[in-house]
Amino acid sequence: MKPNIGISTENLSKVAQALNIILADEYVLYTKTRNAHWNIEGPDFHTKHVFFESQYQQLDEIMDSVAERVRSLGHFATGTLKIFLDLTHFSERQENTNDSLSYIRELLADHESLIIHLRENINIFANELKDLGTSDYVTGLMEDHEKMAWMLRAHLK
């Protein structure tokens, strides 16, 4: 049964499509952060291993939340690696080194790219697609990523 929540079927579909792109970005960023956690090397191994773990745990919660937002709008959440890779704005890790600064720079760039993408869509959800709930939700996601980016950025000072 489709939700009857004051948003047209067409707009619900567009919102779900946009959220599935965000979900793909979150999943790829999660995977890249897990990779950093698993493969970090160097004298700061333990502290960065723990730091990356806290970040991927946050991303895991975010992914679940985005998928549940899509479901609450009456659509299916993307759930295959192929589709995630087709939808994401991100590329797989380019660095060949396993030091903390290389991982941090790449993850920070991805968080900042996602922040920009989220910011660009907040008003689209509210004004064009008439979904203030998703607009508010995406604002919260943006704020979560701004904090995660700050934590990464602080390591580069």
Image (spheres, helix red, strand yellow):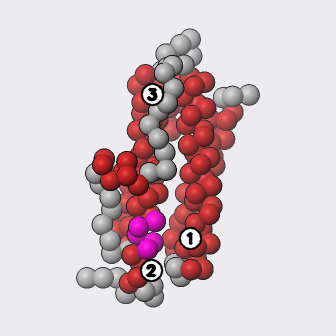
The residues tagged by marks 3 and 2 sit, at their Cα atoms, a distance apart of 39 Å
Which residue is tagged 1? 135
Viewed as shown, does residue 69 lie left or right of 133?
Answer: left
The location of residue 146, given as percent across then percent down, is 63, 49
Identify the amino acid type marked 3: His
Residue located 55% across and 73% down the image: 125
Q: Secondary structure at mark 1?
A: helix
Determine whether 141 is above or below 16 in the image.
above
Q: Secondary structure at mark 3?
A: helix
Viewed as shown, does residue 118 lie left or right of 157?
Answer: left
Which residue is tagged 3? 37
- Residue 11, which numbered label? 2
Nearer-the-camera pick, 97 or 86: 86
Determine whether 20 is above or below 130 in the image.
above
Which image quadrant: the C terminus? Answer: top right
Viewed as shown, does residue 102 lie left or right of 75?
Answer: right
Viewed as shown, does residue 95 lie left or right of 38?
Answer: right
The residues tagged by marks 2 and 1 sit, at their Cα atoms, a distance apart of 13 Å
Residue located 38% across and 84% down the image: 9
Q: Earlier in the sequence, mark 1 or mark 3?
A: 3
Residue located 60% across and 53% down the image: 115
Question: What's the magenta region?
Answer: 14-18
Q: Secondary structure at mark 2?
A: helix
Please name the predominant secondary structure of the magenta segment in the image.
helix
